[in-house]
Image (tube, rainbow, N blue to C red):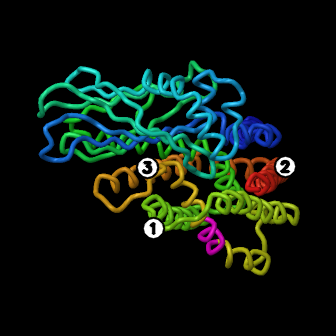
Amino acid sequence: MRFGRSLALAGLLTVVGSPAGLLLAAPAVAHDATSDVYAEVTGPAAGEPTADVAAVLDLEYDLLMKSAWLRAEAYEATGRAEQLAQLDKHEGAVDGYVTDRFVVAYDGEPCAPTLVAADIVERGERPYAALTYSFACDGGLGGVHEVSSALFPDAESFVHSTETVIRYTLDEEEGSAVLTAASPTLTTGENRVLKQVGEFFVLGGEHLLLGLDHVLFLLALLIDARRLRDVVWTATAFTVAHSVTFLLAALGVVSVPVTVVEPVISASIAVVAAVDLYRIWRGRGGLVPGTRAERGAWDRWRLPVVFVFGLVHGVGFAGALGIDAAWSWTLLWSLLSFNVGIEAVQLGIIAVVFPLLVLLRVRAPRAARWVLGTATAGIVAVALYWVVERIAGAF
């Protein structure tokens, strides 16, 4: 029995982690830990006697300027006008950095890149350098193109695990791909459907697992769940809600500013965790059976509240893809596999955490109250910190 108590306690603390550590690490994880590059790659129109390619690359402005080893005045520039001026001033360094790491080839021969235009755009309220390139490719029609990306590699130490999300129309193919350090090249002419599904499945799983706000929201939901039925209904409500808004937002049907979405996501964590904390303090919260009157009010409102918050989380998930386009089957496959990856990791967290919660409550109910109360208080503190930080960052 003592071993069972120790195992449950150790496992739960490992999963929940240190609230103070999360509080301190959160801002770094949110921005500096990793980054995505977005690329739109287009080949010649049907009937054109050329293999030349056009590409538009969106890269986080400050990371690009740091990676090009420019002075602080370049990467700390604020305001669109000043950032455009810095891009123009350091065009050679920026162009050299990008073309050394983003390569288009045709039938095995590199195409010659030319920087056509540079602009500043916003993605998730962050400035991105939008660089338009043309790639002159030698050779006759009928060959295959290769697109490779090694932008923002781990070795630079500014970020890690960078992924380049590509949408392409090349060699009579249309699709999406995720290029990583382990798989840096897209080649046309391959049977890419299964590979595309796998790439976006992994991307979705990583987004949930590395997104501390979504993980903390899920933990807050699990802490108050006493029965398997509660977990099933709660997870279903959250899944349905975020799946709907994720697909609509990723396809540009729904658009909500990130300055609204991110604080509301943080507030949703604080609200659910605060309810957990109150119920634990009152001796409820799934730790001891309550009367029907004690449990009735929250039980009636739990699923509607989770569903509404799930709608907001779905918009947040969509921001990871940076996709804003009309419906297409190739894009739909990417979106669906990304969403399935999110669900797979979500189910994995539930499968690990919920049995630990049950074991802890059964084997050590008194310790469970203190452990879960402390963890829940930490989640509330982290969520409120994020609310303040994200609202302040919007001004």
**Neighbour class for label 1 at 10 Å: few (<14), some, many (≥20)?**
few
Quadrant assignment for the C terminus: bottom right
The Cα–Cα distance between marks 3 and 1, rounded to whole angstroms, is: 18 Å
Q: Quadrant of residue 111?
A: top left
- Left or right: 234 as drawn, with respect to 333: right
Q: Quadrant of residue 86?
A: top right
Amino acid type of the residue that numbered disc 3 sits on in the rendered structure: Phe
Give the secondary structure at mark 2: helix
Cβ atoms at labels 3 and 2 below 8 Å apart: no
- Residue 44 percent across, percent down from the top left: 22, 42
- Left or right: 91 as drawn, with respect to 275: left
Q: Which residues are magenta?
A: 303-310
The Cα–Cα distance between marks 1 and 2, rounded to whole angstroms, is: 41 Å
- Left or right: 331 as drawn, with respect to 256: left
> Any mark on residue 374, and which?
2
The Cα–Cα distance between marks 3 and 2, rounded to whole angstroms, is: 34 Å
> Any mark on residue 338, and which?
3
**Residue 198 is covered by the magenta coloring:** no
**Residue 306 is covered by the magenta coloring:** yes
Disc with the residue nearer the chain's start (3 vs 1): 1
Residue at image x 79%, y 54%? 392
Amino acid type of the residue that numbered disc 2 sits on in the rendered structure: Thr
Residue at image x 84%, y 49%? 374
> Any mark on residue 253, and which?
1
- Residue 46 percent across, percent down from the top left: 15, 47
Residue at image x 80%, y 62%? 274
